């Protein structure tokens, strides 16, 4: 292997070609994942609005799991790519090895939550017996079996940090397709399969995660990569742990804020209408089909920016950032047009009632106004993480979600009722956009502009 395998395309390939090469696998896998989210909720909605509401109440818990897994992975990704760019290969290997263990520790945390707090969690939000019982079972299954998804998220970030986007795509697609196939079988009891309802959706999810996990471990350990992962035979080092979470901890908090946001919105909306909770859940699934490709683009561009930041190549770093923003803006513009013109079509996928249409159509049109400014925020956040400024990314999310959306949604719900709640989204995005511009200008002037060409 020697140093030859350490030669890295992120420092040499033309940026346009490199970004496409790095991003399309992640974008495709994220779109498949978004399709899974839509199909999963579509099947659950066939059980009724209460079943959809039950899954929506648990969605923040799933988001928190993803926050911990992906946030830790972002820290690992950022550290590995920067160390590779600086030719500090041993430290890149150690970062990957530490990250693998951290996935196991994350699982233990969520397994405890799932076993002992599922019923308590659901009873905080609803008095409807079917919703509370179904949601608690769903939460218990996905939390106690989260080992596979935690390890797999770490695995994918390790591979992405080296410039390998194809293998993570294969893992995501394998898991999502398995999930889509098994959903109707376990939910409705088709053929020899048991009819488990909402719990069946959770079982299908876990089996899909196991398939993705198994494929990921084979690809990580059976193939050659730019980093070498050890599971045993090394000691955890405090400095590497700190370096991972210097970016990873803010990323975890930043993504966890989305979970807190959904918890808060579910509480606000649940006090007005449980149909509104279902609408919020449907919106989250449908908008993911627009946002997921942008997040895939994000996954592709972050290691490029991190590598070239470590290599002190300002031109390649900024070229990657600008091109990624142009692509993200175009995707979001298409999404905005679709949400403005076809909200009824999106709602019809989920067996919507007349009440759901009356609430959902204006909600979709109002919330989607935030798509365009969100494109700038997402790509700028990636630049900040890639250059080691995870705390700035965290503040961007805090301002948009905790200072913006939730307080505004609560105030508007008290003053003008349900229809006004949706206006909190675009108004909060303006706050986030303003802060993102300030952060970008500051980091560019103090650090990026001083990099060697």
Image (cartoon, rainbow, N blue to C red):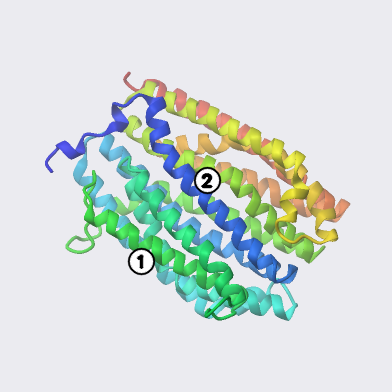
Above or below, comparing residue 216 to residue 18 in the picture? below
Residue 213, image x, y percentages: 37, 62
Using the rendered view, name the quadrant where residue 151 is placed: bottom left
Report the side of 245 relative to 424 (left or right).
left
Q: Earlier in the sequence, mark 1 or mark 2?
A: 1
| Quadrant of the drawing holding the C terminus | top left
Instruction: Tally the numbered discs.
Output: 2
Residue pointed to by mark 2? 394
Using the image, determine if residue 135 lies above or below residue 395. Answer: below
Residue 115 visible at all: yes
Residue 359, image x and y in percent? 82, 54
Question: At which x and y percent is residue 287?
Answer: 64, 47
List the residue tagged with mark 1: 104
Q: Residue at x 55, y 57 (%)?
A: 36
**1 or 2: mark nearer the eye:** 1
Disc 1 to disc 2, how far (Cα)?
24 Å
Left or right side of 266 for 232? left
């Amino acid at each position: 292997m020697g140093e030859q395998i350490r030669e890295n395309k992120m420092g040499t390939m033309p940026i346009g070609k490199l970004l496409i090469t790095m991003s399309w696998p992640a974008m495709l896998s994220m779109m498949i994942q978004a399709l899974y989210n839509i199909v999963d909720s579509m099947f659950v909605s066939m059980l009724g609005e209460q079943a959809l509401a039950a899954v929506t109440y648990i969605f923040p818990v799933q988001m928190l799991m993803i926050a911990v897994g992906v946030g830790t992975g972002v820290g690992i990704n950022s550290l590995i790519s920067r160390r590779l760019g600086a030719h500090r290969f041993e430290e890149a290997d150690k970062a990957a090895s530490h990250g693998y263990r951290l996935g196991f520790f994350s699982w233990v945390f969520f397994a405890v939550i799932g076993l002992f707090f599922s019923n308590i969690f659901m009873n905080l939000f609803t008095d409807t017996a079917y919703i509370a019982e179904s949601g608690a079972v769903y939460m218990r299954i996905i939390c106690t079996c989260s080992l596979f998804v935690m390890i797999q998220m770490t695995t994918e970030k390790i591979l992405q940090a080296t410039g390998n986007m194809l293998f993570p795509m294969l893992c995501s697609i394998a898991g999502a397709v398995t999930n889509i196939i098994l959903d109707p079988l376990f939910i409705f009891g088709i053929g020899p399969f048991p009819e488990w309802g909402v719990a069946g959706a959770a079982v299908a999810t876990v089996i899909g995660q196991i398939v993705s996990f198994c494929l990921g471990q084979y690809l990580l350990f059976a193939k050659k990569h730019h980093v070498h992962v050890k599971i045993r035979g090394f000691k955890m080092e405090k400095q590497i742990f700190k370096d991972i979470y210097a970016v990873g901890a803010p990323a975890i908090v930043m993504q966890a804020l989305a979970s807190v946001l959904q918890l808060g919105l579910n509480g606000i909306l649940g006090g007005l209408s449980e149909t509104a909770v279902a609408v919020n859940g449907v919106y989250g699934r449908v908008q993911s089909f627009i946002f997921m490709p942008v997040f895939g683009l994000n996954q592709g561009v972050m290691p490029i920016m991190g590598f070239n930041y470590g290599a002190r190549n300002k031109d390649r770093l900024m070229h990657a950032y600008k091109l990624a923003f142009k692509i993200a803006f175009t995707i979001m513009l298409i999404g905005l047009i679709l949400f403005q013109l076809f909200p009824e079509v999106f709602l019809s996928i989920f067996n919507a009632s007349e009440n759901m249409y009356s609430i959902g159509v204006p909600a979709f049109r109002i919330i989607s106004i935030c798509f365009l400014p969100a494109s700038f925020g997402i790509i700028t956040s990636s630049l900040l993480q890639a250059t080691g400024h995870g705390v700035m990314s965290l503040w961007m999310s805090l301002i948009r979600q905790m200072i913006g959306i939730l307080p505004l949604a609560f105030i508007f719900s008290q003053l003008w009722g349900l229809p006004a709640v949706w206006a909190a989204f675009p108004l909060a995005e303006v706050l986030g956009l303003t802060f993102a511009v300030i952060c970008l200008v500051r980091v560019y002037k103090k650090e990026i502009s001083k990099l060697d060409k």
